[in-house]
């Protein structure tokens, strides 16, 4: 039996359009980060917490239906070259702790929101991205994080349509919903 999709079917909550009271807390952004911030402020006794967002349907968490990224939007290779491997490891580990905190909060509140740790797939579209992915996986492995590199045939065997990229001799993929092993 198919579950109701929480992020797409739950109606938006439109609150007051009035200016928040002086001394109250205003959280800007209604995505996972903003809602989490407001929740924890309320949980720790703050009152008068308001959340504002400009166009909810264009917000990051709304567009991606609440996808939580393990790590950062930067590859581990980029993160390590910007901040050094030790800081990159700490940032990556922090993201895993955030995911655990979200999971615990969902369970504690009894939310039916299809939370799953199903991993994710990064796909290179050219030689430069391919090299960055390979280096990122090497660094992730050195730092103790679970991560794997798959050649195009393996990616295709997972259910992705692998097609020649018109800009190079490398391959790109057409992504469709697919669940596979946990990353991180």
Image (tube, grey):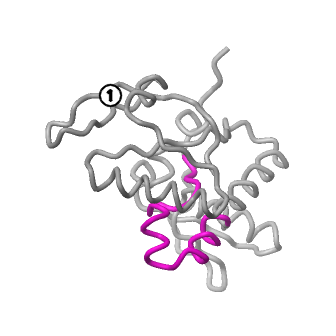
Q: Position of residue 137 (x, y in %)?
A: 51, 54
Give the residues drawn in magenta, as a range.
Answer: 67-93
Instruction: Write down the quadrant of residue 71 in the picture.
Output: bottom right
Label 1 belongs to which residue? 162
Task: Tell me the chief SS of the magenta region.
Answer: helix
Residue at coordinates 57% horizontally, 59% vertically from top-left? 140
**Magenta residue check for 116:** no
Residue 163 locus on image (x, y percent):
26, 28
Left or right? Give the position of 52 relative to 25.
left
Q: Quadrant of residue 148?
A: top right
Which is more toward the observer, 81 or 105?
81
Residue at 75% x, 73% y: name it.
Answer: 47
Residue 127 position, x and y percent, is: 27, 50
Element assignment for label 1: strand
In depth, the one of 152 and 100 nearer the eye is 152
Side of 40 where 32 appears, left or right: left
Of residue 10 and residue 133, the one placed in the foreground of this image is 133
* Mark 1 neighbour class, 10 Å CA radius: few under 14, some 14 to 19, many 20 or more: some
Question: Residue 159, position in %: x, y?
Answer: 45, 23
Q: Is 57 above or below relative to 27? A: above
- Residue 118's place in the image compared with 83, above or below, is above
């Amino acid at each position: 039996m198919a579950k109701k999709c929480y992020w797409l079917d739950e109606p938006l909550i439109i609150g007051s359009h009035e200016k928040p009271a002086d001394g109250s807390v205003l959280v800007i952004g209604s995505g996972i980060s903003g809602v989490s911030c407001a929740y924890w402020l309320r949980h720790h006794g703050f009152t008068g917490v308001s959340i504002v967002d400009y166009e909810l349907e264009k917000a990051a968490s709304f567009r991606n239906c609440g996808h939580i990224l393990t790590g950062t939007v930067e590859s581990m290779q980029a993160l390590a070259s910007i901040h050094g491997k030790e800081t990159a490891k700490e940032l990556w580990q922090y993201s895993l702790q955030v995911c655990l905190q979200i999971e615990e909060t969902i369970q504690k509140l009894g939310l039916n929101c299809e939370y799953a740790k199903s991993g994710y797939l990064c796909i290179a579209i050219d030689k430069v991205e391919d090299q960055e992915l390979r280096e990122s996986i090497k660094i992730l492995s050195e730092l103790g994080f679970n991560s794997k590199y798959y050649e195009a045939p393996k990616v295709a065997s997972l259910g992705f349509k692998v097609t020649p990229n018109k800009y190079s001799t490398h391959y790109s993929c057409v992504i469709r919903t697919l669940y596979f092993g946990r990353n991180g």
